[in-house]
Amino acid sequence: MWIAGDMNLLDIDWVNDQVVRHQYGQYISESFLQLLARAGLEQVVTFPTRGNNTLDIVVTNVPSLVKRCECAPGLSDHDIVFLDANI
C-alpha cells in the first residue's frame, strides 16, 4: 500500500518518528504518528522538501520495496520527491 500527500506536519522529525516542535497542536502530530504506527505504515520521505520542512508524505507498509527516494529541484520553493520503487 502506498499513500502520498502534501501535508503541513512541520512538527514531526521523520527520521526519528517523534514530535520535536509545537508550532501546531501537538495532538495532531502525535495522533498522525500513532495512526501510522497502528496501520503499520512507514514514512519514506525523511528529507526537507520546502526550506527546512518535510511537507511531502509518502507512506508504505512495505518499505523494502523503496529502491531510492531523493529530492530533486522544483520550479518554485517546493522541491520534488523522486521515488523509485519495485511495485
Image (tube, rainbow, N blue to C red):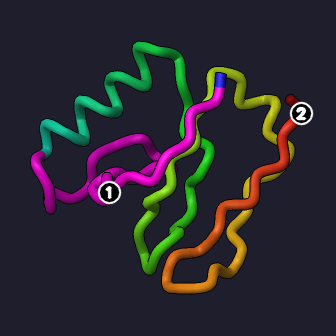
Q: What residue is at 49 percent from the left and 46 percent from the top?
A: 5
Instruction: Characterize the local packing of mark 2: few (<14), some (14-19) or many (20 or more) Cα atoms within 10 angstroms.
Output: few
22 in relation to 28, above or below: below
Circle 2: residue type? Asn
Could you say where residue 51 lies in the image, as x and y percent from the top left? 44, 80
- Decide whether residue 54 is among the magenta residues: no
The quadrant holding residue 11 is bottom left
In the image, the segment drawn in magenta is 2-25
Q: Earlier in the sequence, mark 2 or mark 1?
A: 1
The quadrant holding residue 62 is top right
Residue indicated by mark 2: 86
Magenta: main secondary structure equals: loop
- Decide whether residue 3 is among the magenta residues: yes
Could you say where residue 50 lies in the image, as x and y percent from the top left? 47, 74
Q: Is residue 8 left or right of residue 52?
A: left
Q: What residue is at 62 percent from the left and 44 percent from the top?
A: 44
46 in relation to 3, above or below: below
52 in relation to 61, above or below: below
Q: Is residue 73 left or right of residue 47?
A: right
Indicate the quadrant containing the C terminus: top left, top right, bottom left or bottom right.
Answer: top right
Q: Secondary structure at mark 1?
A: loop
Q: Is residue 22 left or right of residue 38?
A: left
Instruction: Between residue 21 and residue 59, name the one nearer to us.
Output: 59
Q: Is residue 63 left or right of residue 34?
A: right
Residues at marks 2 and 1, CA–CA distance in whole angstroms: 28 Å
Residue indicated by mark 1: 8
Q: Secondary structure at mark 2?
A: loop
